[in-house]
Amino acid sequence: MKTIIAVILVVAVLAAASFFGLPMLIDQQSAPIKKEMNDLNARLQKAESFIQAEEEARKKTQLPPDADVQKIIQMINALSAKLTAMETSTGKKFIAATEEIKGQKAATEAALKKQSEALEKEALQTREKLRNTLYKALLEVIRGNILKAKVDVVAKNIGNAKTELDGVTVLLEKAKNMAAAESRKKIEELQGTLKKAKVELDTDLSMSLNRIELIWHEINVLMKEEETSGKEVNK
């Protein structure tokens, strides 16, 4: 009886040991296998990620999944040709735009130069017309004063004659400064004649009167010459 009980106890102990110890033993024995499975899963995940990345790259470059090296080279060459064509086209457009800008700049400068020359010519003509008008007006005043001096000499109003001739002296100097080069010499000669006429008012009225007459005549000649010159300027 005791033996049976002992056997039963041994069997119970063995059963309990088997029940609790067997899982531990299985875990110990299966640990390397689990590690290998985990490593294999990790490799599979890497492989799947690589394949997915390759597929995405092919989609971006528009390459078919079965594209071979020859097709890839052809596509690269085609893209390179397009890029070269674009660069060439862009370069030509840039050169054309640059040339157009240069042409516009040259045309603008030419137009500005032409306009500037036209304005300068017009300003010169305007100044010449103004000078001509003032000069003619000054000669008119001189001729009037000479005529008054002539009348005073004839009337033997020597004082008044001298006053008129003094005014003529001042006006002749102004006229000389305004006159053209060819007229200045004549005016200088008239200044010399006027100086003699003023002196002769006290010594020889007849000679003084002749000189005054000569001055009046030469003033008329200057006025006609200036009128002809003015017409040339106005053309």
Image: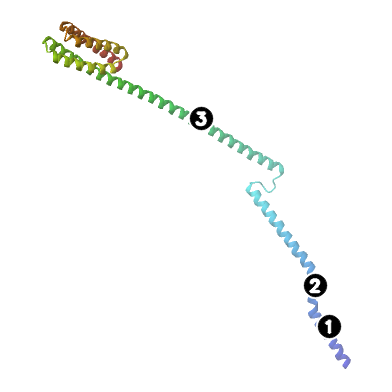
Residue 148 point in image, percent of width and height:
15, 14
Residue lying at the far front of the rendered structure: 203
Which residue bears the numbered disc 1?
Answer: 14
The span from disc 3 to disc 2 (Cα, nearest Å) is 86 Å
33 above or below 158? below
Given residues 129 and 162, the one toward you in this image is 162
Sequence-first tag of 2 and 1? 1
Q: Tag 1: residue type? A: Leu
Task: Identify the secondary structure beneath mark 2.
Answer: helix
For the residues bearing labels 2 and 1, Cβ distance under 8 angstroms? no
Instruction: Report which quarter residue 213 is drawn in.
Output: top left
Give the number of the mark in front: 2 or 1: 2
Give the number of the mark in front: 1 or 3: 3
The residue at 84%/88% (across/down) is 9
Give the number of the mark in front: 3 or 2: 3
Instruction: Report which quarter residue 115 is drawn in.
Output: top left
Residue density around tag 2, few if under 14, some if 14–19, many if 20 or more, within 10 Å: few
Given residues 157 and 41, the one toward you in this image is 157
Residue 27 point in image, percent of width and height:
78, 73
The residue at 73%/62% (across/down) is 41
Q: Tag 2: residue type? A: Gln
The span from disc 1 to disc 3 (Cα, nearest Å) is 104 Å
Residue 178 point in image, percent of width and height:
28, 18
Q: Tag 3: residue type? A: Glu
Image mark for residue 99 = 3
Which residue bears the numbered disc 2?
Answer: 28
* Horizontal relation, residue 234 to residue 90: left or right: left
Task: Identify the secondary structure beneath mark 1.
Answer: helix
